[in-house]
Every structure is written in C-alpha cells, then in structure tokens.
C-alpha cells in the first residue's frame, strides 16, 4: 500500500488544540491537525496462564492478598525460547493487519522494553529483520513502565519532523526473566506480553472539529528515585542480568501524585477537561493506583480500561495491550478521546491524549 498524501508540516508540528483563523471567523471550533494518528493496534500474550493460587504454592502468599492489594488474579508467562522480540513481532503483525498494511509500509520501529532479548543490538532491529523491513530506522527505548508513552511521543515527534511516515510503536516485555521468584513482594506483580500500534503521518486534508491523532503528550523523569524500583544487575556494573527490586509503598505513593500531575498538564495543553475523555487507559500496575488516580482526576470508573486482573503488570506492554483489548471488544471507537498515562522505574512518568 502506498503512503497517503503529503504531511503539512506547518500543522504537523502542533500537538495542541487551538482555534484556527478561518474556523474562528466562520464561528466553528476547529483544531490543529495532529502530526500522526493511530491506524492499527495489536497484541500478543504467551499461552501459559499462571494464577495466584499457583504462586501461593511457590511463595508465602495468597490469592486473597494479591487480589485485595493489587487487583491481579493471573498473569501470562513466556515459554522457554519465547523472547520479547517474538511477542513484539506477533503484536506488530496484528497491528499491521488491523491497519490493512504490510511490513514494507513501515519506515520506523520504536520499541519500548526493559527486558530486551540481548544487551545489544536492540530488540527493535530483531523485529525489523523478522518483518522483512529494510527502510528507515528501528531502536529501543528504556523507560520501563512509561516506555510506551515515551515511544509514542518519540515516534510522533519523528513523524512531525518528517523523518518517518509510518511507525510501529511497540511495548514488549518478558519480566518473568528478571523476577526473583523467591521474593513474594515482587514476583506476584508482573507478567509477560506485548502490544503495538501503527502510527501514520496525518494527510494534508482540511482540519475538522475532531482531527484524529496524538493531540498532546508530556514526559517526565527524576533519577533521584532510581533506587526505589530497579534491577540489581547490568552489563557495566555487575556483568549479570540481575533481578527486579522495589520499595513498593514509596512507588505506590509517588505513582498517584505524579500521574495526576502529568495528566492535568496534558489536558491543559489540549484545552480538554477530564469529563470530555471517552476512555482512560492507564498503565496497569495496581488497581488501587488506577482507581485512586481516576477518582482524583474526576474520571468515571465506567471509562477506565482495566486489564491488570488478567495480565498483571506487563510494564511497557500494559497500555498497548489494554488498547488492543478495548479496541477489539468495541469499546474504543474511531473519534473517541483516549487518555494514556504511565509511571515506572527511574522514576519516569508521562501521559498522552489521542483522538482515536
Ligand atoms: O509498574 C511500576 C509501578 N509499580 C507499582 O506501581 C507498584 C506500586 N506498589 C504497589 O502496588 C504496592 O505497594 C504493593 C502491591 C507492591 C504492596 O502493597 P502494599 O499494600 O503497599 O503492601 P506492603 O508493601 O505495605 O506490605 C504489607 C504486608 C507486609 O507484611 P507486614 O510487614 O505488614 O507483616 C508484607 O511483607 O504484606 C506483606 N506482603 C505480602 N503478603 C502476602 C508483601 N507481599 C506479599 C505477598 N503476599 N505477595
């Protein structure tokens, strides 16, 4: 399939709503066209389901504790030989099918992961090679659970700059490989999976009242918190892969205030109120964090997409997995306003507002 009409970069660089001159004079509210829009979404989960009851046979925990503290009932765990890149490739192929595109239509892959197949090269180039893509660039982003929001914002910026026309934006993880399976405070929380979207440069057609695409986003980080959620190994420090370590309560407290703050920033940039949001798709770490954030933002619980019960925390994969689910089951429809937010190791956090 050939690429659509040329991008009008004078509009493409703008990512926030505004009244354009002709719209204002005609009395209609028109908004700047975002640089890129989502045209396909896909996901992939390993086959193996591990329930809380199964974990209770391995560590001193219970289904009751895990459900009441986190909302998680089960998670998927990758099979031996099933790598982050394999899950990413499956999610990418599904997103391409959904968009009615083929791999050679893609000229950028931005893949968010904290569990790459190898230290280098990037997992993104493994996906690029398996999809048979030779054009453009492919690279990984390391922002842990905020990775998908970082990747989406980065791909959109590269499209706005004219560097790429169509991107696969992927969040893919095999956290089961970095968990300490004897540590009940962390091993019950995470799962494996991948999700992907196809992001395409918006055509040069006229503006409307509701142009599709990434309307606004914001990214944050603060390395002063990097010892609160981290992996205790790495090629340069220990020459080992290491295991995930977390000071859960401190992460929990920070997560709510940070995400509310960055979401409010994005809504203000877009000139949109929380009540106008159709779907809230937060990072799926803990149902209590999601409930508290939605309450503080004034978003009704009926608009919150929840997958944490079945997926656990899949880090960078959690938002695109949730997007794929809510798109497949008919909740998220073209034209809906979808709010994404995430927070994770670093700390990193961010939010994005997308007209689907
Ligand atoms: O994705 C990146 C962001 N990550 C997060 O957002 C995670 C944020 N943190 C959390 O979600 C929560 O802090 C946890 C779910 C990790 C923990 O919940 P909590 O309500 O903060 O529990 P806690 O750490 O205060 O622990 C309470 C008790 C402790 O026992 P004592 O000291 O009160 O006797 C823990 O040892 O629960 C115990 N505990 C467990 N008990 C049964 C900790 N883990 C478990 C477990 N099963 N798996």
Image (cartoon, rainbow, N blue to C red):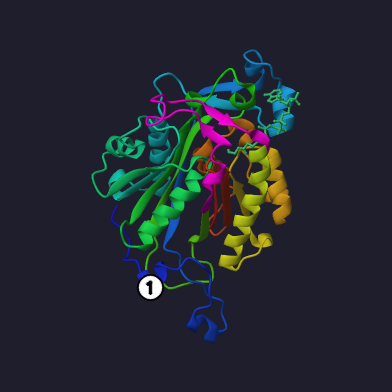
- Residue 147 highlighted magenta (yes or no): no
Can residue 299 be seen at all in this image of the molecule?
A: no
Foreground residue, 282 or 186?
A: 186
* Picture quarter with ligand 1: top right
Which corner quadrant of the image does residue 249 belong to? top right
Residue at the outermost left position: 134
Relative to residue 205, is residue 301 drawn left or right? right
Q: Which residue is mark 1?
A: 10
* Vertical placement of residue 196 versus 72, above or below: below
- Mark 1 vs ligand 1: CB under 8 Å? no
Count of labels in the image: 1
Q: Residue at x 49, y 83 (%)?
A: 21
Foreground residue, 242 or 157?
A: 242
Q: Residue at x 59, y 24 (%)?
A: 187
Q: Which residues are magenta?
A: 220-249
* Vertical placement of residue 39 versus 96, above or below: below
The x and y percentages for residue 201 are 37, 60
């Amino acid at each position: 399939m050939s690429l659509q009409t040329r991008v009008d970069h004078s509009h493409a660089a703008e990512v926030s709503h505004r009244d354009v001159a002709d719209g204002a004079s005609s009395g209609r509210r028109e908004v700047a066209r975002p640089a890129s829009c989502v045209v396909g979404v896909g996901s992939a989960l390993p086959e193996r389901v591990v329930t809380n009851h199964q974990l209770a046979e391995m560590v001193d925990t219970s289904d009751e504790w895990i459900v009441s503290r986190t909302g998680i009932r089960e998670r998927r765990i990758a099979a031996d030989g099933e790598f982050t890149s394999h899950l990413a490739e499956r999610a990418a192929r599904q997103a391409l099918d959904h968009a009615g595109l083929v791999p050679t239509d893609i000229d950028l892959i931005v893949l968010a992961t904290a569990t790459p197949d190898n230290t280098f090269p990037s997992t993104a180039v493994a996906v690029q090679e398996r999809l048979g893509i030779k054009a453009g660039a492919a690279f990984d982003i390391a922002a842990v659970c905020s990775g998908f929001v970082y990747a989406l914002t980065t791909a959109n910026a590269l499209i706005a700059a004219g560097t790429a026309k169509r991107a696969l934006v992927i969040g893919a993880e095999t956290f089961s490989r970095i968990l300490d399976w004897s540590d009940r405070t962390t091993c019950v929380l995470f799962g494996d999976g991948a999700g992907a979207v196809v992001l395409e440069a918006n055509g040069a057609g006229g503006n409307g009242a509701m142009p599709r695409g990434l309307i606004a986003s914001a990214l944050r980080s603060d390395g002063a918190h990097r010892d609160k959620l981290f992996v205790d190994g790495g090629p340069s420090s220990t020459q080992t892969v290491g295991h995930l370590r977390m000071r859960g309560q401190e992460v929990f407290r920070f997560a709510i205030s940070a995400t509310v703050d960055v979401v409010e920033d994005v809504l203000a940039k877009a000139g949109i109120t929380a009540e106008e949001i159709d779907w809230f798709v937060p990072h799926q770490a803990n149902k209590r964090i999601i409930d508290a954030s939605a309450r503080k933002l004034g978003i009704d619980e009926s608009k919150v997409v929840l997958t944490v019960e079945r997926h656990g925390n899949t880090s960078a994969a959690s938002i695109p997995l949730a997007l794929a689910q809510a798109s497949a089951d008919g909740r998220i429809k073209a034209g809906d306003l979808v709010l994404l937010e995430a927070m994770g190791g670093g700390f990193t956090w961010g939010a994005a507002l997308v007209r689907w």
